[in-house]
DNA sequence: GCTGCTATATATAAATA
DNA sequence: TTATTTATATATAGCAG
């Protein structure tokens, strides 16, 4: 694949062979990885150089992969365990393998990826199941959102309360200075343009006389979710 | 490497993913073989598709290759199993059990039965997946229905055609008997309550009045001897 | 043994049959 | 599914450091 086309046979020149080995080895591993990622496949690759060095690639655990592979080739090939224990283990493996296969299939169906051979009845049932699942997910989602809102609301109410306390302290201080303040003076500073009603909505922490509010941002944000 | 550059991430479209898997799998195996031949290396390659099918390539004996590989990796790691085989089986059990657990969990999530600890992002993604699956199921369902309809239409059209042929044969027979039949006579026997026009529409595999009847008992019975 | 550099050979994504 | 076709993207053979 390059300057010249080459025949697929052992490269005579040793140096060239090594260079090619190095390049192609990396290329092969890259391709293996791409296949695994692109197609959601499991890939295991083992390479021994002529000099005996080992290189490998595995999309997941090479150990698991090879065990899985052995299992398959065993099932498709020979069968010869005398040991009862081994036989038991093997039965277990078969059972588990079947379970995995079954669940994988079910998952694929739910993803709509393997609907081969399903009849109308089964398809309808599947759709119902998906719709039910979706509904639950959506509910959970909404619940989460509501919780978040409630939490924010609590925090907001808390801030309102704090603010009110601050306001009272300020009043006390001003009074203690001997200056009896105009009522309107403080209110102007603290409540700005808000109307009292906006507070009554905001949670139970606030029971007293609707003492205006303070951090306008908070009350605005809090008010929205409750319509 | 083609019409468009793609990102190396799981291909969303199922069909495209399968096609790509098929192509790249072959490409990868070809490259593996070339590496083995050109550079006098030993190469072993194992591929599991997402559906669980196995593909492999080995420049020599996969068994030998894997044993050699295990030897190497063991040397680089640990080495102390009472019974290697038992250990392997046991590991396999653990791995399979984990796989079952994982898939069960995934299934439960898709059924909306175990959404504990999922955040908003994850819930949204799950919902998207469910919606995608449902959409595919619905599509498949519709396709099935359309096929059924089309099939029935074809059969109907075919019956109509047969019927017309039978009618012609019967006419010929009656003529050959030397009895010039009343036109009305045959029509009455064969088409029964049908007006002649209803037949002329139904030429080949049309879309017109699909099923109707035609296969009235009478005409069918008449037809049999001539087929 | 690596690089980096081309000019080519291959692989392959999409569209199509 | 599977195969062909096409336009492009990649891989890489042969060199030079």
Image (cartoon, coloured by chain):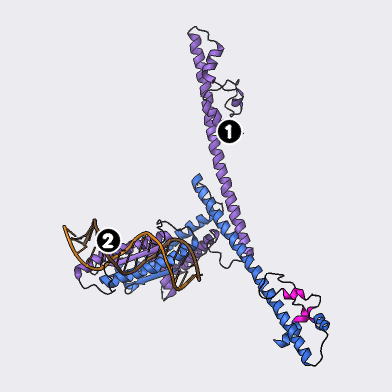
Chain colours: A purple, B blue, C brown, D orange
Residue A185, position as x, y percentages in the image:
53, 13
Question: Distance of mark 2 from mark 1, alpha carbons?
Answer: 63 Å
| Quarter of the image that includes the N terminus of chain B | bottom left
Report whether residue B213 is seen: no
**Placement of B132 over or under B23, stated as above or below:** above
Is C13 in front, or is A184? C13
Residue A106, position as x, y percentages in the image:
54, 61
In the picture, measured across the screen, residue B109 lies left or right of residue B207, that is left
Q: Main secondary structure of the magenta part?
A: loop
Residues in magenta, as a range? B190-219
In the picture, measured across the screen, residue A210 lies left or right of residue A2, that is right
Q: Residue at 82% x, 91% y: name it.
A: B179
Q: Callout 1: residue from which chain?
A: A
Q: Which residue is mark 1?
A: A224
| Quarter of the image that includes the C terminus of chain B | bottom right
Residue B65, position as x, y percentages in the image:
31, 70
């Amino acid at each position: 694949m390059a300057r010249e086309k080459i025949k697929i046979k052992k490269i005579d020149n040793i140096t060239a062979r090594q260079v090619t080995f190095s390049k192609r080895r990396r290329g092969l591993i890259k391709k293996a990885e791409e296949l695994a990622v692109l197609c959601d496949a499991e890939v295991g690759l083992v390479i021994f150089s002529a000099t005996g060095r080992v290189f490998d690639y595995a999309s997941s655990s090479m150990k698991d992969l090879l065990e899985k592979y052995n299992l398959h080739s065993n099932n498709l090939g020979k069968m010869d365990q005398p040991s009862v224990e081994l036989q038991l283990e093997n039965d277990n493996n078969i059972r588990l393998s079947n379970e995995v296969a079954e669940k994988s299939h079910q998952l694929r169906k739910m993803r709509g990826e393997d609907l081969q051979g399903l009849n109308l009845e089964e398809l309808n049932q599947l759709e119902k199941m998906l719709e039910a699942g979706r509904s639950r997910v959506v509910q959970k989602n909404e619940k989460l959102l509501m919780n978040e809102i409630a939490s924010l609301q609590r925090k907001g109410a808390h801030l309102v309360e704090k603010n009110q306390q601050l306001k009272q302290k300020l009043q006390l201080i001003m009074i203690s200075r001997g200056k009896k303040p105009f009522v309107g003076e403080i209110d102007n500073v603290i409540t700005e343009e808000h109307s009292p009603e906006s507070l009554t909505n905001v949670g139970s922490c606030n029971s007293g006389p609707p003492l205006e509010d303070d951090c306008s941002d908070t009350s605005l944000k809090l008010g929205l979710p409750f319509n």
